[in-house]
Amino acid sequence: MAERDLAQEIHRDRTASVVVGGRRLTIEEVDAVAKGRRGVVLSDDPRWREHIERGAEFLRARLAAGATVYGVNTGYGDACVVDVPPELVEALPLQLTRYHGCGMGRHLDEGETLAVVVARLNSLAYGYSGVRGVLLERLADLVNLRVLPRIPAEGSVGASGDLTPLSYVAAALVGEREVTFEGAVHSAAAVWARLGRAPLVLAPKEGLALMNGTAVMTGLACLAFVRAAHLARVAARLTALATVALDGRAAHFDRLIFDAKPHAGQALAAEWIRDDLAGRDDAPGQRLQDRYSIRCAPHVIGVACDALTWMRRDIENELNSANDNPLVDPERERVLHGGNFYGGHIAFAMDAMKTAVANLADLMDRQLALLVDEKFNNGLPRNLSGASPARLAISHGFKAVQISSSAWTAEALKLTMPASVFSRSTESHNQDKVSMGTIAARDCLRVIELTEQVAAAHVLATVQAARLRIAMEAREDVLTAPLAAFVEEVAAVSPFVDEDRPLEPDLRRLTAKMADAALVVCTNDSTHGAR
């Protein structure tokens, strides 16, 4: 591919791309790039571009004047007391990328890798890292051309940044290690040659600038936020549908109850449920109070909704920060050595998020347990079997699904142990207090994955229960319009279970929709904390 054609491909549609440079990025923009819906493009504002080049030029001038700059003409970490001879300064960045090539575990998937690269690009685009504009352009190339570093998930303690996993991003730029491209694994050098590009030669601070930051944990946190917000909304929808299926009371979600205890997220969750039940009247013969997993659902979901507000603040602040070391201040001609690579805010947000999400899993699992149990489901068939009377004795409906849901819930709850309190002193006690933010983010994504599986099980079972309730009551107005539309959407993925069958394919299809936040649970509203 010719250089001109490549540039046209990258910049083919600025309106469909996320602009990086001179503006704040949002969680949703990172998520859109990660899902392949948008590309990235660097700002064309000449003032921003001048600011980037001024930082790189200032750093070059400092070196030419004989100044000592950490990680540029000194060793790294505990070796900061080691002076690097001038003739080796140019070689130092490549050394850094190479010796950190020791990651292990699974490789980040395509969406996760895209989120990581966007997070690193945006941080460097603030102009305090002393990198050249060409480095930012090459990071944008990774995204737009889908030249994706194969990043092992394990090996970061979250300070001094995500050094080891981000070394794979740096290595891809310089033509080393492996990348995925067009659906296959290739050497980075081979892909750049195929694209007609020479690998990037890193300037003295650029290896450190690429690696010494919080991009892995922050990119993963953006993805976790979107999925957690979707789960909160799904949990509210399922509570409304379960209320109908169990012949429960809509009065539990009356506005006054939540005005009297004014947590905003709790009130919003109750409003979602109330809207889904609009027009439903409680009958005299109903149980006076539904069980806690129904009646207290807004209180459980509301915790997650309220937590998402401060999580958004902290995740987007980290996303829109210069988080490497040292920072370059060309305006005042200073190089500032600090600790912005410390990922404590992301670590704490991810530890809190996994607890809030695991509580959603527990809530949904308890609701599912009520639905399948004929002692508590107010007349529905045992295990929600839809079998004919002649086949009922050998039919078990959703019995095994409830068992599996309980297993997934237990695993999610087990993983809520906070990672951020397990700091380990590393690197000759230079990195003696670290954030563990990337471990927290990975744990959080696993809790979310398990919770999405619980939600998928709950969706299938609750839709089955609602259909059974409609058949029992022999009328068409059992469901409100939003709930009826939801049932129809799910029915397209999983037909009514009238005869026992393996439900794994249905669960997998539905879980994939969950992970993509593609299950339609609302129209005009948005999750508390999400824009």
Image (spheres, rainbow, N blue to C red):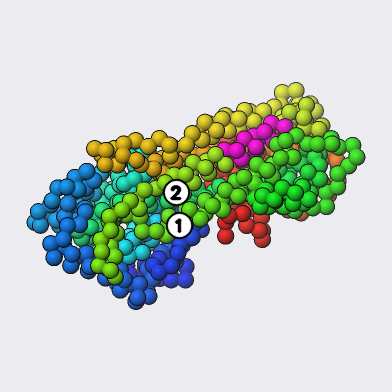
Residue type, numbered disc 2: His
The stretch of residues the image draws in magenta is 358-371
Q: Is residue 113 magenta?
A: no
Say whether residue 175 is visible. Answer: no
Is residue 313 placed above or below 137 in the rendered structure? above
Residue 317's mark? 1
Work out how far the residue at label 2 is from the one at label 1, CA to CA, in angstroms: 9 Å
Mark 1 secondary-structure assignment: helix
The residue at 62%/28% (across/down) is 403
Residue type, numbered disc 1: Asn
Q: Hey, which residue is sitting farthest top in the picture?
A: 393
Pinpoint residue 35: horizontal percent, then vertical percent: 48, 55
Which residue is under mark 2? Answer: 345
Instruction: Look at the image and tell me in which quarter the C terminus lies.
Output: bottom right
Is residue 490 placed above or below 143 in the rendered structure? above
Q: Please state if 464 lies on the left or on the right of 309 as rendered.
A: right
Pinpoint residue 234: horizontal percent, then vertical percent: 64, 47
Tally the marks: 2
Residue 47, quarter of picture: bottom left
Callout 2 touching callout 1 (CB < 8 Å): yes
Q: Please state if 75 lies on the left or on the right of 185 as rendered.
A: left
Residue 326, quarter of picture: bottom left
Name the dominant secondary structure of the magenta segment. helix
Instruction: Look at the image and tell me in which quarter the N terminus lies.
Output: bottom left
Q: Of callouts 2 and 1, which one flags the residue occurring earlier in the amino acid sequence?
A: 1
Q: Hey, which residue is sitting farthest right in the picture?
A: 284
Front-lying residue, 77 or 25: 77
